[in-house]
Every structure is written in C-alpha cells, then in structure tokens.
Image (cartoon, rainbow, N blue to C red):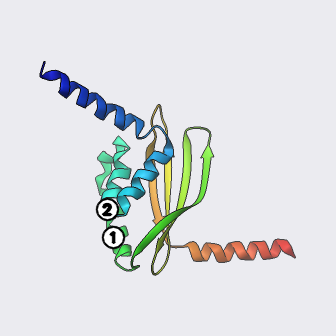
Amino acid sequence: MKKLPVLIFLCAIVNYSVYSQAKSEDITNEFFEQYKNSPMEAVDYAFSTNQWFERNMDAVENVKSQLDKVLNLIGEYYGHEIITEKSLGQSLKLVSYLVKYNRQPLRFTFVLYKPKDRWQVQNFLFDDNLGDELKEAGKINNLLLK
C-alpha cells in the first residue's frame, strides 16, 4: 500500500514533462521564466529538452561561457519580446526574441523541433547584431520606396 503514493507521484512527474513540451511556446515560456533569476540555468533547461545535447556538453558550456561574458557587460535585464516566428511544416519552428538590457539588446533565437510527440530545442543562438540588421533593412526599404 505504501507504493501507491510513490507511483502516483512518478506518474505526475512523467505527465508534467510530456505536457510541459506539448506546445513549442512551453519551452520558451519556461526558459524566460528561469532566465529572470538564473540565465545559465535557463540555458541548461533549454538544452536539457533534447537528449542529444548530453553527448555534446562542450558546445553547451561554450554557449554558456560566451553568454556569461556578454551579460557581464550589458547591465540589467528588463524583459523580452518576440521578434519573429517562422515554421517549416508543423514540426520545425524558429522563434526569435529581443532580450532587453540596460546597455543594449540581444537576440535569442530558438530552433524548435518536434520529432514525434514533444518539442525540443534543436539549436539556441544569441547575438547582438540587431542594430546592423536594422540599418540594412532601412536601406532596402529606402531603395524600394524610390
């Protein structure tokens, strides 16, 4: 009889982990919820959604190290907002966010993949090239208006 509560608890954990990745936005929502308090734990969470990253922990540590260096230079975190979301079919999605900091924004890009019945992070990238891209987009728009 003592095994029943443990079994119920284990079933609840399994159901939660499947449900928590039933929609692609569940991953990014959880990522940014963790990011507020601990950016490195949020990155660990993102990569933990895909079992194949366990085999390439050097790449994960490299991303975390680079992000940590940047975060030490750009000040206080103020939040995030979505830039774009693109899909290829129903199982592959790119979602890009503007991540707001005191000194300058960053862009976080998630490539999410659903191989079977749950979403996982296929790739996570960050950069600070938003200003350059905005200038280039302005040039293109100015040429089209002439």
Element class at badge 2: helix
User: Which residue is drawn at the image coordinates 31% and 62% (left, top)?
Assistant: 40
- Most distant residue in the right direction: 146
User: Which residue is drawn at the image coordinates 57% and 72% (left, top)?
Assistant: 130
Type of amino acid under label 1: Asp
Q: First in sequence: mark 2 or mark 1?
A: 2
Q: Position of residue 21 (x, y in %)?
A: 43, 40
Q: Position of residue 17 (x, y in %)?
A: 35, 37
Q: Position of residue 23 (x, y in %)?
A: 49, 40
User: Which residue is drawn at the image coordinates 77% and 72% (left, top)?
Assistant: 141
Element class at badge 1: helix
Q: Is 2 left, or right, of 72 in this rendering?
A: left
Q: Position of residue 34 (x, y in %)?
A: 35, 57
**Residue 116 versus residue 69 in the image, above or below:** above
**Residue 8 versus residue 128 in the image, above or below:** above
Labelled disc at residue 68: 1
Question: Which residue, given by chain and number where applicable, does mark 2 sit on?
Answer: 40
Labelled disc at residue 117: none
Q: Are marks 2 and 1 in contact (CB under 8 Å)?
A: yes
Look at the image and tell me in which quarter the N terminus lies.
top left
